[in-house]
Image (cartoon, rainbow, N blue to C red):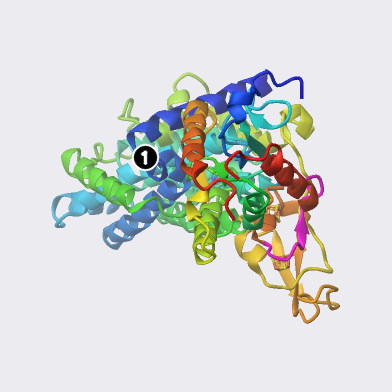
Amino acid sequence: MYRRSLLSLQSATLRLDTWINRVLPQDFNPLYYTGGLANLFLTLLVVSGILIFLYYEPSLEGAYASVEFLTRDVPYGVVFRGIHRYAADAYLVAILLHLFRNWFTDRYREARDSQWLSGMFLLVVSGFAGFTGYLLVWDERSQLLASLTVQALRSVPLVGDWLARVFLGGPGVNDTTLPRFLFLHVGPAMTLYVLLWWHYVRLRHPKIWPPSVWVLFSLGLLFILASALPATSGRPAQPGASPEGFAVDWFFLWPYVLARWMAPGWALALVVALVASGMVVPYTLRETPEQRGVRALGQAVVVEENCTGCELCYYDCPYNAIYMVPSPYPGKSRAAANRKLLAVVVDSRCVECGICIGACPFEALELPRMLDKDVQQRIQRGARATAPVSS
Amino acid sequence: MATVPDRTPQAQEGAPRVVGFLCDWAVRSEGLLNADDTLVGMPHVTVIRVPCSGFVKPGWLELALRSGAAGAFVCGCPMGDCLNREGNWIMEDRIDQLRKRLSRQKVDPERVAFFAFGLHEREAFLRAVAEFVDRVRGSGGKR
Ligand code: HEM
Ligand code: SF4
Ligand code: SF4
């Protein structure tokens, strides 16, 4: 059932591409650059975030006023605030598109699971930073979010009270609360870069930027949005007040919308369950390649006697699965006799694509179940099957 | 090859032999090939399915030309959508270089080509192959 729906989702995803490619040149299809778009919006978030940070004052009395000052009195402050808010939404949309695309086009399991897992961590940390961002304004919405969060944390068994204390920096909201929230916003944002290192470590030159047309388009769109629909605060937080409704940002605050219908603790449990199931996605379908309808040709194998250490395969492998090591012994072929380096394939990273085979000019790499000599035979058979009349 | 009804003498007449490589993830494969790996409706075109367009060695394309094929092509996924991230870009580059090499050897570089078509683009793929066959018709087997 799950398997079949994945297949039809794959088909639908690629159908959508076909339509987009009819309108745009193939290599401008934004769905091919969802990771790059996410990175673009993240960069804009960091830049606009630093500018906002210069004006922000993390204290109960000063926070709201400092944000208002930025919005009203600082030239272009309202634009930067707006960009920070809308880039966050665009960023989340981009990562979700990225997640679903990689899922539906079968780029998430086996040798690619490390990118999926790091991606899930990126998603969680991004979501958390998005939520803590809304705490910093310290308006009525922040107050309500904080109190719902405290309720949710308190209902965690055993460690609940302790978690709530850690969150607020004391038994209740106090003078250390907002500096703590500021850390809970900026800290995760910086953690994203550590996670991105993990995300990229197995990818050879990851496409971290979309085509420049899309960079300009996204920037323009954000500027227009930020100026036309300025990001605003609610009324300032009042000690002891219990605000009812507020304008929600569905992208980041949906668990709090749920908390309207269920106890905050259950909303938290739901989020945890969703994340946990996301983490196991690469390991849920235990099927053989035949069941998947995929030819598994085996991981690339280096034919050691022929390898000359030329490094061409190393530069072409898109998954960084080839390492060049100092050659432990000379090769057999003439070209390989004086080699300094030897190529080694890291099996756990190899996706069996064969790109290194196409790169190797010395017949020193093979996919075990599609050997060079067999391909050559088929080529010759095809080329000769019937002599063309013109020859 | 009794299973190939459309291999009529007329189809062979004057049709140059072409060898192509087609990525497993590109054009949908069901009903695309005859039992002997020739393309349906184009028995003079042999297609070898490969795990990724980037698997193809430029030497294989040269081998095809040397063995009597009038042309050789590689078809990968749409640019930007390679399952293995870069296979089709890399292959496009390799074909560009191969073309330069061929011109230096006084072989018509138009005899090798790169295509990019997705799962649902079988018609466009078949049209591109037919056009390619027409293009190489003149230079068939010369070498
Ligand atoms: C901060 C958010 C993220 C950014 C900036 C990001 C960026 C990228 C980039 C630039 C690539 C390389 C694409 C390429 O060159 O082909 C990539 C690959 C990948 N990402 Fe993300 N990503 C993010 C979040 C996620 C999430 C949430 C998931 C899913 C859970 C995910 C799953 C993957 C996978 C599976 C690949 C490998 C694709 C392949 O092997 O072709 N990423 N990401
Ligand atoms: S087949 Fe070669 S290029 Fe592809 S992932 Fe494995 S080692 Fe890298
Ligand atoms: S391309 Fe071939 S010869 Fe060169 S390092 Fe890789 S395996 Fe060795």
- Look at the picture and state if B97 lies above or below A233: below
Q: Is residue B59 visible?
A: yes
Quarter holding the C terminus of chain A is top right
Horizontal side, residue A229 vs residue B121: left or right: left
Which one is in front, A122 or A24?
A: A24
- For the N terminus of chain A, the image quarter is top right
Q: Residue at x 29, y 39 (%)?
A: A238
Specify start and end residues of the magenta stretch as a single range. Answer: A360-370
| In this rendering, position of residue B16 left or right of residue A157 | left
Q: Position of residue B63 (x, y in %)?
A: 67, 54
Q: Position of residue B107 (x, y in %)?
A: 53, 58
Label 1 chain ID: A
Q: Residue at x 63, y 31 (%)?
A: A273
Instruction: Identify which residue, A44 or A181, lies in the foreground.
Output: A44
Provide the major secondary structure of the magenta segment.
loop
Residue A176 in view of the camera:
no
- Depth order, front residue of B43/B88: B43
Q: Amino acid at mark 1?
A: Asp
**Which residue is under mark 1?**
A89
